[in-house]
Amino acid sequence: MPLNLFFIAAGLIACLLILRRRADASPPGPRGVPLLGSALELPSKFPFRKFNEWSKLYDGWFVFSAIGQKFLVITNYDIAVDILEKMGTQTADRPTVPMAIYMARHIAFTLENYGDRWRRCRRLAHENFNIRALDQYHGIYELGTAKLLRQLSNIDPLKVPEELLQFSGTLTYEAMYGPESGGENVKQNIRKVWEMAETLGDAMSPAKFIINLIPALGMLPERISPWKQYGTRYFNEHDRFLMEMAQPGLTGQSDSGFVASCMRMRDRTEGISDAEIAWTSFALYGAGVETHINGAQDEVRTVAGDSPPTFEHRSKMPYVMAVMKEVLRWRPVLPAALPHTASQDFHYNGYRIEKGTYIFYNQWNMCRDPAVYPDYDVFRPERFLADPPAPDPPVFGFGRRICPGRNFARDLLFLAISNLLWAYHFEKATDADGKTITPSPEDIDGNILLHPKPFQFIMTPRREIPQ
Ligand code: HEM
């Protein structure tokens, strides 16, 4: 064989060998220490910050392990589209967390794997919360917003976040169970749903229940397993509570709201049960209620005039819409989103991702990509009005699991922002020496879900609030 042909053949064989080895290799990422992997480096709070730190060392994605569990973290938008949308059938599962199974018995679809039950419940959510279906809730929102404006007229600004939470809680409650579902128990029921969602969310943490770290403990029978006993108590109590709330819609006493509407589509949704409808309303409610609420004043004043803004004004309020997008981008409420799991091995970019790997996508990084959102730390709504405009921030997830409440949330945010700006003037507070107090953008709280810490500000009515 002539010498140059020999070199070409040898080069080709070497390339093939390298490619084959790479195809079986795991993507690059932090190594950690033997056995524990990177477990000790993971903070118990704000994992998105650690992911952000690591993102600087790797190019758009990386893999690490913690006590034997593999984690893939995606920090680049295009890679998220490839893995979570184009390969969506392989990457739409959720992690199997033992406590979630004992407490929610596979019936809360947010936690459920990509299978028939998820599909059924997701369909109910989609049919009731897609853009066309949302018209049915507009009356509820507008009445609720008018009430909010009245309630804020005499209130300490530090109490405003609580009022906003109550506002979004009540509107979501009425959207689920119908406007007439109000009554005396509403406040109490809303609190109970929050607590229920919070307890379930906390129970998923490995720090809270050791069984989440050592699933083999699940082999113990229930009588000597405190985790299973706790799960059974939680499930029974909350199943009763959810069924009671859904009762009017399930039995035809009420014909408005999500539950009643699910009953009307029952014959088109094969296999759906009363319990699935009741728990799907909780999944939507629990996921939606805290994620809603987080100077377009001239625009609002010009467009709406003397009456409060409604949905009819939306297309004439591009600046308000840009403010809403910038709020969502600047501090995404779910910075590391919710984890998916790989339901089978798959290859991407020449690397292999193993079945069972948890997949996080750090929306925090995507909303702060300097090529897409220059000066990403600056709050600048104008970026969405430029020519060409910045793309909408990727804060609602990807692929088959994309947030089913995203249009509902956008509607409510538009109405709340435009009405608050119409009714009130907002300013920074001042200290005893008259110096302006600027809240630090780092003052955030929460864990998976972010919210600002309470801060002082001044809120003055700009007009007579209609009573
Ligand atoms: C600003 C408001 C909101 C934001 C930023 C947001 C964001 C998200 C994100 C990032 C996910 C994870 C998607 C994934 O797993 O890939 C999600 C899932 C979900 N969201 Fe939202 N959301 C919001 C409001 C709402 C509202 C109002 C509802 C209900 C009416 C809702 C219901 C849900 C549900 C049920 C899921 C789980 C979907 C599934 O597992 O199939 N969200 N949301």
Image (spheres, grey):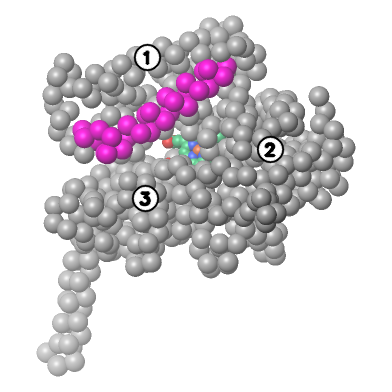
**Quadrant location of the N terminus in the rendered image:** bottom left
Question: How many residues crowd around disc 2 within 10 Å: few (fewer than 14), some, or many (20 or more)?
Answer: many
Kindly state the secondary structure of the residue where label 1 is placed: helix
Residue ID at (15%, 82%):
10
Calculate the distance from the C-alpha at mark 1 to the C-alpha at mark 2.
34 Å
Residue under circle 1? Answer: 237
Residue ID at (71%, 49%):
427
Is 151 a magenta residue?
no
User: x%, y% of residue 246?
Assistant: 51, 14
**Which amino acid, by three-letter code, is at mark 2?**
Ala
Residue ID at (59%, 52%):
439
Residue 416: image tag: 2
In this view, the residue farthest toward the right is 306
User: x%, y% of residue 69?
Assistant: 22, 47
Residue under circle 3? Answer: 47
Q: Read off the magenta span.
A: 186-212
Q: Is residue 50 left or right of 387 when viewed as pictured?
A: left
Q: Earlier in the sequence, mark 2 or mark 3?
A: 3
Q: Nearer the viewer, residue 442 or 22?
A: 442
Q: Is residue 36 left or right of 260 when viewed as pictured?
A: left
Residue 120 in sight here = no
**Which amino acid, by three-letter code, is at mark 3?**
Pro
Q: Relative to residue 89, is residue 55 depicted above or below?
A: below
User: x%, y% of residue 90?
Assistant: 33, 45
Calculate the distance from the C-alpha at mark 2 to the C-alpha at mark 3.
30 Å
